Image: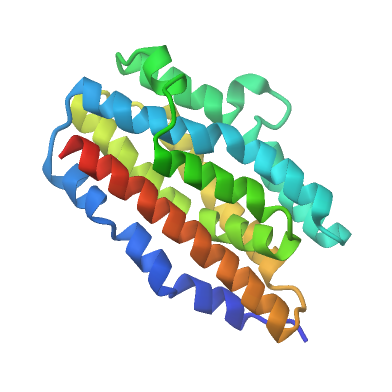
Amino acid sequence: MRNHSIEAALAKNSSREQLIKHRFFEVVDEKTFSVEQAELVLGQWWHPLHYFPTFLGRLIAVCPNLEMKTAVTHILNQEVGEGDVERAHERFFIQTMTDAGMARAAVSEANMTPATQRLLDGYARSTDNYLTGLGFLYGTEVADLTMVAKLGKLVRRTTGLKSLPWVDIHVKQEPDHVQTAGQTVGLTYTDAEMATIVKGAEEMWQLWVGFFEELRNRVV
């Protein structure tokens, strides 16, 4: 039986709420960051952004059926530019941030903080089990636009730049990513399999909570 309740449960999960309402985002709403502080934040964001296509590729490799592989491949194709490398998300990110006056090295070559390393280790580990990987994928997609919008606000308030192509591409593609990721968790699963997917999403959200908590401690 196809189970839609897992999507509803994940959407209302307390760990997701903890992430999308993180107190770091309150700081973004209230404070104008210096360029150096903005570079610090964005330099850490770069690492999961850069790793995400690798995560998707690894997930495709371990997914056991074609429906899953096709859905994840669709997301990966958009992430890497749909055949045009200049439209890849990480290229939009670098273009946006350097146009805003930030140093390329600062936003794409910074050393990882411990929390960032834990986050990437979690993404890498998740694809040891395709169910955990699907939880990481769905959990990412239902929180990503909120995180990107807040970082876009940070950049606008810091630099005054209005045009943010990196944010625009997320606004355009993210609803499709959420729907596509939802197809993978809406397939037929046993109760134990669904529990593994949910546990994966919860782990991913908590790793992101730690990521933003460390950033908050560094900029406040």
Q: In which quarter of the image is residue 41?
A: top left
> On screen, 42 above or below 23?
above
Q: Is residue 199 rendered to the left or right of residue 25? A: right
Q: Quarter holding the N terminus?
A: bottom right
Q: Where is residue 37 in the image (x, y as percent from the top left)?
A: 23, 27
Q: In which quarter of the image is residue 161?
A: top left
Q: Which residue: 70% across, 32% down?
A: 82
Q: Is residue 71 rendered to the left or right of residue 9? A: right
Q: Where is residue 202 in the image (x, y as percent from the top left)?
A: 50, 66
> On screen, 208 above or below 189?
above
Q: Which residue: 46% across, 44% down?
A: 171
Q: Which residue: 30% across, 13% down?
A: 101
Q: Is residue 144 rendered to the left or right of residue 59? A: left
Visual colour scheme = rainbow
Q: Which residue: 46% across, 21% down?
A: 108
Counting labels gives 0
Q: Quarter holding the C terminus?
A: top left
Front residue of 58/159: it is 58
Q: In which quarter of the image is residue 79?
A: top right
Q: Position of residue 127 (x, y in %)?
A: 71, 53
Q: Position of residue 203 (x, y in %)?
A: 51, 62
Front residue of 134/162: it is 134
> On screen, 56 above or below 185?
above
Q: Can residue 121 be seen in this view?
A: yes
Residue at the limit of the structure toward the front, as seen here: 114
Front residue of 48/150: it is 48
Front residue of 140/82: it is 140
Q: Can residue 160 be seen in this view?
A: no
